[in-house]
Image (spheres, helix red, strand yellow):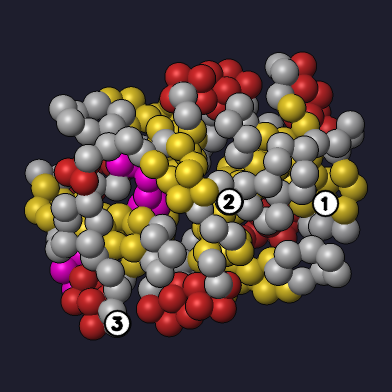
Amino acid sequence: MIQKLTHAPLVVSDQDEALKFYTDILGFEKRADYQQPGKPRWLTVAPKGQDLEFILVQGEFKIDSHLPPEAGTGGIHYAFTTDDCEGDYERLKARGVNFNVGTYTEPQKQSWGTSMYFKDPDGNQFALIQPNTLSKVLTAATGPTT
Amino acid sequence: MIGKATHVPVVVRDQDNALEFYTQALGFEKRQDYQQPGRPRWLTVAPRGQELELILVKGEYLVDPRVPRMADSGGNHWVFLTSDCRKDFETLKARGVQFKDPEPVDAPYGIAAYFTDPDGNHLSMLQPAQKTAWKAET
């Protein structure tokens, strides 16, 4: 039976540049970095403590979601949890991260918590979500845990 | 601090078609399906028991980073853990899933099978050789 996702791809134009961004700026760990003859370089990173790894794949991409800027990412994003959205915003801003995603430029208060959006140097889009206490309780009551 | 990833996107042209593939062919569960006015349809699926969700996002590649369907993925793929690669291969094949090779591949790191979704996204399932090591990690 298919049990779980262990690797998800992130397409980047320069693997070394991307590695710097994901480790130095976002604080992820490098998990694997090797190259077999005739194969692309297998480079993965992951948030500390998470099983799932992101494969930093060399390539170019452009996606049209056919949506206006008000739609934000149009759903095309990788979402992460955080325990301090405002604090992360300040830290990542100081490191030069691009927060212009759709019409968003800074953290947004929502009924369920605080969220913000940012981009990596290649335009991959991310959401950082800090659920409020109620959402956490609901997740604990209804959602599966890893 | 940035914690764990909870959602990763998979870009698809037709969300209904993709939903059918991920739920009926792969056996994932549908987790969320709603649409707010002026927003795209938020449709997510996940392997049973995993918190992480795949967002089936409607979109179109203008510059496509993916290699053709039957080529190697070039690393650009989603990897799933399986407890029985050969059995899943037979099950999925019977459901019409398109595999790259006629049989699962024996590699030093385990038994792997490479396939694509209806949009040409490359997927694979791996039954690791050192299964206990993987279990310990979770």
Q: From the viewer's perspective, is A123 left or right of A52? A: left
Judge whether B72 appears above or below B60 on screen. below
- Residue A84 circle label: none
Q: Which portion, as a residue range, is magenta?
A: A74-87
Q: Tell me the kind of residue under disc 3.
A: Arg
Query: Helix or strand or loop: what does disc 2 sit on?
Result: loop
Please provide percent x and percent y for residue B80. 64, 44
Q: Tell me the kind of residue under disc 1.
A: Gly
Question: Where does label 3 land, which residue?
Answer: A95
Please provide percent x and percent y for residue B101. 85, 36
Q: Quadrant of the C terminus of chain B?
A: bottom right
Please provide percent x and percent y for residue B10. 49, 40
Q: Is residue B23 visible?
A: no
Q: Tell me the kind of residue under disc 2.
A: Pro
Q: Is residue A5 visible?
A: yes
Question: Where does label 2 land, which residue?
Answer: B65
Question: Where does label 1 land, which residue?
Answer: B110
Q: From the viewer's perspective, is B47 left or right of B25? A: left
Q: CA distance from mark 2 to mark 3?
A: 28 Å
